[in-house]
């Protein structure tokens, strides 16, 4: 008899409570640190709170990888419950979270026969789009190993772009140098960042936020015929009229489904307020 498949993610996947609950996805929290206090992302803290904290105190948030025991307990619970397990995780080049999950999986399933992992090489809904694709494959009756292989291949074809309004948060989190941050602020540069080989890379440096959004949208439009047009995601750290503008422009391109997501505390800790991203998968 074929076993059911349980999908597990970390909290950097940013799919949101509605989707997590609808598909019964288990979420392992990454930790967010505000001053001397540590919180579980998704369960205990959200984006609005971290930005309010920084505005009030001048102290920038930090993140810490998910704990081994959280992964072990999650894997063990569903393994013992008779499930095959698929974990789709945050880029292994940006966090120790994936390697921690891998270690926990091998402790629970030493032969690697029932717990399968995907290194998304991505962040936020760059992970989320892969999870939604995985759910479709599961619904179609594919085995957990088949799903893992298909999703790992799709991970290499997932394109994540985002415009950063301020580099202050990336610099404080060690994702860019103080010199780069200072230069961007002085020249009013609004970098377009792309996930390349699991890392954050600046691909363009438009002057001005609106120009940055237009440049990002132009990249999507230029690639439109190469894209799987079934789904595109627009992610944002803070809702504003620029988000509405971006969503409208993306919808006008002709995608079948346009979803939006508010980035969770983990991703928002590093990208800062005013960040808007677009995520899709190439054919």
Image: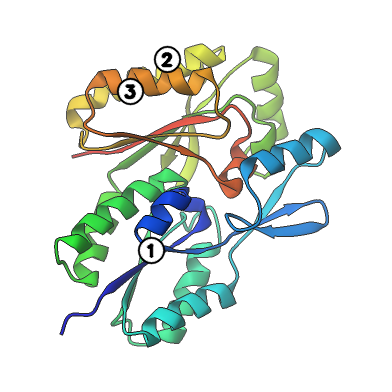
What residue lies at 65% left-to-right and 13% top-to-bottom? 187
Q: Position of residue 163 (x, y in %)?
A: 50, 26
Cβ atoms under marks 1 and 2 closer than 8 Å: no
Give the CA distance from mark 1 to mark 2: 37 Å
Q: Would you name the residue on which mark 1 appears?
A: 24
| Mark 1 or 3: the one toward you | 1
The spot of residue 47 in percent (x, y) is: 63, 42
Q: Which structural element holds mark 1?
A: loop
Residue identified by numbered label 2? 214
Tag nearer the camera, 1 or 2: 1
State the residue at coordinates (64%, 26%).
Answer: 166
Q: Is 228 or 254 nearer to us in this picture?
A: 254
Q: Is residue 115 left or right of residue 270?
A: left
> Would you call the spot at circle 2 few (<14 residues within 10 Å), some (14-19), or many (20 or more)?
some
Contact between marks 3 and 2 (CB within 8 A): the answer is: no
Asked which secondary structure carries label 3, the reply is: helix
- Image position of 169 with respect to 166: above or below: below
Separation (CA) of disc 3 from disc 2: 11 Å
Q: Earlier in the sequence, mark 1 or mark 3?
A: 1
């Amino acid at each position: 008899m074929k076993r059911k498949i349980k999908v597990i993610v970390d909290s950097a996947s940013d799919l949101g409570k509605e989707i997590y609950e609808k598909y019964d996805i288990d979420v392992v929290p990454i930790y967010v640190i505000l001053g001397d206090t540590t919180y579980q992302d998704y369960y205990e803290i959200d984006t609005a709170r971290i930005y309010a904290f920084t505005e009030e105190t001048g102290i920038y948030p930090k993140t810490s990888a998910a704990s081994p025991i959280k992964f072990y307990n999650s894997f063990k619970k569903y393994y013992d419950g008779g499930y095959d397990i698929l974990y789709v995780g945050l880029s292994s080049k940006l966090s120790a979270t994936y390697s921690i999950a891998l270690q926990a999986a091998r402790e629970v399933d030493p032969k690697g026969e029932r717990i399968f992992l995907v290194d998304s090489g991505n962040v936020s809904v760059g992970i989320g789009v892969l999870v939604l694709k995985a759910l479709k494959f599961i619904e179609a009756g594919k085995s957990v190993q088949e799903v893992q292989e298909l999703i790992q291949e799709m991970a290499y074809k997932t394109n994540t772009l985002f415009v950063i309004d301020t580099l202050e948060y990336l610099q404080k989190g060690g994702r860019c140098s103080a010199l780069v941050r200072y230069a961007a602020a002085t020249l009013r540069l609004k970098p377009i960042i792309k996930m390349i080989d699991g890392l954050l890379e600046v691909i363009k440096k438009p002057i001005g936020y609106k120009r940055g959004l237009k440049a990002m949208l132009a990249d999507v439009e230029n690639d439109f015929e190469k894209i799987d047009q079934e789904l595109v995601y627009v992610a944002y750290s803070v809702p504003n009229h620029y988000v509405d503008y971006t969503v409208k422009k993306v919808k006008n391109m002709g995608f079948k489904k346009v979803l939006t997501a508010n980035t969770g505390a983990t991703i928002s800790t590093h990208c800062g307020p005013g960040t808007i991203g677009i995520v899709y998968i190439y054919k």
